[in-house]
Image: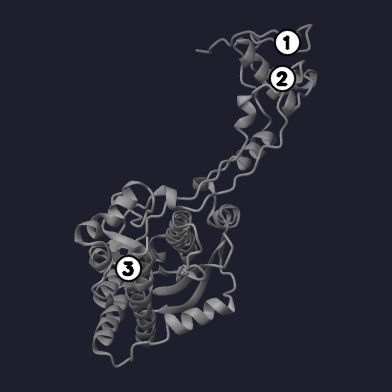
């Protein structure tokens, strides 16, 4: 049985605008496009603003596909950005620069204070840990191993190499307020003015302003100083009771956030973060580097906050004593350092994070790359990593304690 179609009059309406009751046929839509004058974006925004301020309900102006496309790109959030866009559009807005050049003074600092004494390849513990990582890496590459398996292998190596005064945490969220600030662009579209030349607020225009936000750090592995170890070191200067609650009180009052975790773990002043990926499950080094860039910068921010707290304390002493005070320079004032490891399966990169004197920028430079499926690659990587761990438990910790004792 043939179904009867609903009749539609082919006669065009006398008005140039197609009636809202007209049939939405192809011919009717083409007729509407021919007879409708184009309306600019500013006009549409003004119309929406007038309707909202007058209380008259109105339809949201429909933008052309090209306008919608450009508006979408302007309001992109980090979750919609590609890995390359996140690095070059967003990290740079936070003054984080990846793969920059390492200055001579930073290089001199690391060579003489971090990597000045590398463990001998015949060191029994180092050799044992290296053998284990090497064999585990060869085992993992024979199957489609994911991020969790590779992270576990590296965590085991770090845990067996770390000195007693350090703490290690895995997959824990860091506080949002430790991230470097992102400098978002300002709107360039003028808002509507009323007859008295006052700017009328327009919510529609504000939606076009992009708001970029760094992803919160959540390192796969994080290494820092033990809270208990720091407290014991402060006992001679502050007394046992005060030493135990000193860093806790500073954190509770937000005077100094030394434990970066949302839920404090007793790991303070992190100096090494690890971001792991597995190519077999879709991860890559580029993604790991982006994540490490934020985590490493947050670690530097903690050290900067310590420096600022020391400066405030010294200013207070000058006011109290009403005279010049001979102050001790913060050891990490000139060279604030942190490290990170990024991995893609058996490929391991070691990075240094630093800030230059009197600059707010954060820099991240690669120090070397190793493949742990090779015996020499595993051994040489762990020699460098062991040096970072010993520096963290040695000179780095001593510098931190020296400052805390004087606050």
Left or right: 163 in relation to 343: left
Judge the density around disc 2: few (<14), some (14-19), many (≥20) Cα neighbours within 10 Å. few
Left or right: 9 in relation to 164: right
Judge the density around disc 3: few (<14), some (14-19), many (≥20) Cα neighbours within 10 Å. many
What's the residue at 76%, 20% (across, down)?
A: 197
What's the residue at 38%, 61% (across, down)?
A: 281
For the residue pair 248 and 295, the one nearer the viewer reads as: 248
In this view, the mark in front (3 or 1): 3
Residue 359: give x, y in percent of width and height. 59, 62
The residue at which mark 2 appears reads as 27
The quadrant of the picture occupied by the C terminus is bottom left
Q: Earlier in the sequence, mark 1 or mark 2?
A: 1
Residue 234: give x, y in percent of width and height. 27, 65
In this view, the mark in front (3 or 2): 3
Dots 1, 2 in contact, CB < 8 A: yes
Q: How far apart are the alpha carbons under marks 3 and 2?
A: 61 Å
Task: Assign a secondary structure to mark 2.
Answer: helix
Residue 10 tag number? 1
Residue 150 tag number? 3
Task: Assign a secondary structure to mark 1.
Answer: loop
């Amino acid at each position: 049985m043939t179904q009867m179609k609903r009749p539609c009059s082919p006669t065009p309406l006398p008005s140039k605008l197609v009636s809202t009751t007209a049939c939405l046929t192809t011919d009717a839509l083409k007729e509407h496009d021919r007879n409708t004058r184009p309306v600019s974006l500013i006009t549409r925004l003004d119309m929406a603003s007038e309707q909202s301020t007058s209380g008259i309900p109105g339809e949201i102006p429909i933008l052309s596909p090209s306008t919608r496309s450009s508006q979408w790109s302007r309001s992109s959030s980090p979750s919609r950005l590609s890995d390359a866009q996140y690095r070059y559009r967003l990290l740079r807005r936070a003054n984080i620069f990846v793969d920059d050049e390492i200055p001579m003074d930073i290089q001199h600092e690391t060579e003489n204070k971090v990597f000045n004494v590398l463990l001998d390849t015949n060191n029994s513990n180092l050799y044992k840990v290296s053998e284990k990582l090497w064999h585990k890496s060869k085992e993992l590459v024979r199957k489609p191993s994911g991020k969790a398996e590779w992270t576990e292998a590296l965590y085991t190596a770090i845990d067996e190499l770390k000195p007693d005064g350090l703490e290690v945490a895995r997959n824990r969220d860091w506080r949002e307020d430790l991230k470097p600030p992102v400098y978002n662009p300002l709107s360039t579209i003028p808002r509507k003015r009323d007859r008295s030349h006052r700017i009328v607020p327009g919510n529609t225009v504000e939606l076009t302003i992009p708001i970029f936000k760094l992803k919160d750090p959540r390192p796969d592995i994080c290494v820092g100083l033990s809270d208990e170890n720091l407290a014991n070191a402060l006992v001679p200067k502050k007394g046992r009771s005060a030493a135990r609650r000193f860093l806790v009180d500073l954190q509770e009052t937000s005077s100094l956030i030394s434990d970066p975790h949302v839920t404090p773990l007793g790991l303070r002043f992190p100096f090494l973060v690890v971001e792991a990926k597995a190519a077999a499950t879709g991860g890559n080094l580029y993604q790991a580097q982006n994540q490490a860039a934020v985590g490493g910068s947050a670690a530097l921010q903690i050290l900067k906050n310590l420096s600022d707290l020391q400066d405030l304390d010294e200013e207070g002493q000058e006011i109290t004593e009403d005279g010049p005070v001979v102050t001790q320079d913060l050891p990490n004032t000139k060279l604030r350092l942190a490290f990170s490891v990024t991995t893609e399966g058996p490929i391991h990169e070691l990075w240094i994070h630093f800030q230059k004197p009197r600059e707010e920028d954060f820099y991240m430079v690669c120090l070397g790359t190793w493949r742990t499926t090779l015996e020499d690659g595993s051994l040489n990587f762990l020699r460098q990593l062991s040096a970072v761990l010993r520096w963290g438990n040695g000179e780095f910790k001593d510098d931190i304690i020296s400052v805390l004792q004087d606050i």
